[in-house]
């Protein structure tokens, strides 16, 4: 059994997007209705944690450490954040080559963050060399509208769900349906909580008004009693 659900490969210059994506994966909790079902990668897990992420700068080290190599081999999947920068990274490519050499091509999940896949242009190419001839499908975080109105990419939310479905080993439409149901339940719970809060607030206002009125009446009665004794 592997130690990590996935190894997260990216270029350090893409830290901002990498931070967001890693949080989305490592903190994800699977909808209860599909936990334990038979998925393409085995039983659907309750969570994706731990996602291994190396935060050191390999470019300055000159070699991959034994710890990092071990984490690669001990990861069930490989998530590759694909950008023109990561496409030029020797270490991102090495991590892809390692997974291919281990016979885990079907467990590599490219995620397009910027650039163009298989463009042939070094300035825009976002796939590392090892992935360019594999035909792997990628989740796409881009949301670029071309001059003809065509939208390129899935956007961050769509790309995130596509990647999550792949890592969980479930059909995308099933995960989308379960996420919508979870959101409806959350909205319902928030609505109920809002009603309870509103009820408590109304009760507090009424109690305050009653207390003020009782104080006013008591003060009036006191003044009347004082006048009667004069």
Image: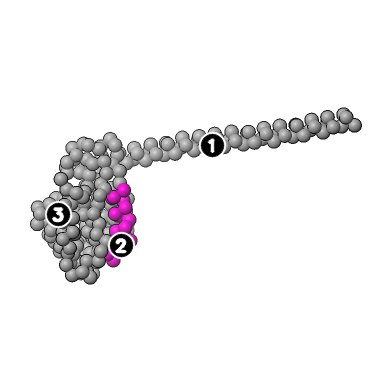
Q: Which residue is mark 1?
A: 198
Q: Which residue is mark 3?
A: 73
- Residue 215 in view in this figure: yes
Q: Position of residue 185 (x, y in %)?
A: 38, 36
- Residue 173 in view in this figure: no
Q: Say few, some or many: other residues with alpha carbon within 10 Å of mark 1 (under 14 / 14 to 19 / 20 or more).
A: few
Tell me if residue 53 comes above or below residue 57 in the rendering: above
Q: Position of residue 28 (x, y in %)?
A: 30, 46
Q: Which mark is residue 15?
A: 2
Range shown magenta = 12-27
Near-viewer residue (81 or 229):
229
Q: Earlier in the sequence, mark 1 or mark 3?
A: 3
Specify whether residue 103 is painted magenta.
no
Q: CA distance from mark 2 to mark 1?
A: 43 Å
Q: CA distance from mark 2 to mark 3?
A: 23 Å
Q: Nearer the viewer, mark 2 or mark 3?
A: 3
């Amino acid at each position: 059994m592997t130690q990590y659900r996935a190894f997260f490969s990216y270029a350090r210059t893409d830290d901002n997007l990498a931070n967001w994506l890693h949080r989305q994966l490592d903190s994800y909790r699977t909808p209860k209705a599909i936990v334990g079902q038979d998925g393409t990668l085995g039983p659907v897990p309750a969570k994706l944690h731990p996602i291994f992420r190396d935060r050191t700068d390999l470019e300055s080290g000159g070699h991959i450490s034994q710890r990092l190599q071990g984490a690669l081999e001990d990861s069930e999947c490989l998530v590759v954040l694909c950008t023109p920068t990561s496409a030029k990274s020797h270490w991102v490519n090495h991590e892809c080559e390692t997974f291919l050499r281990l016979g885990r091509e079907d467990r590599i999940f490219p995620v397009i963050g910027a650039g163009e896949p298989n463009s042939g242009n070094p300035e825009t190419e976002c796939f590392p060399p090892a992935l360019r001839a594999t035909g792997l499908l990628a989740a796409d975080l881009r949301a670029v509208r071309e001059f003809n109105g065509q939208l390129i990419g899935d956007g961050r939310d769509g790309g995130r769900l596509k990647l999550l479905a792949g890592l969980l080993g479930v059909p995308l439409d099933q995960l989308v349906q379960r996420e919508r149901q979870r959101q409806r339940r959350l909205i319902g719970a928030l609505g109920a909580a809002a009603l309870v809060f509103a009820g408590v607030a109304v009760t507090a206002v009424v109690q305050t008004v009653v207390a003020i009125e009782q104080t006013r009446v008591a003060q009036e009665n006191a003044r009347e009693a004082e006048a009667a004794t004069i």
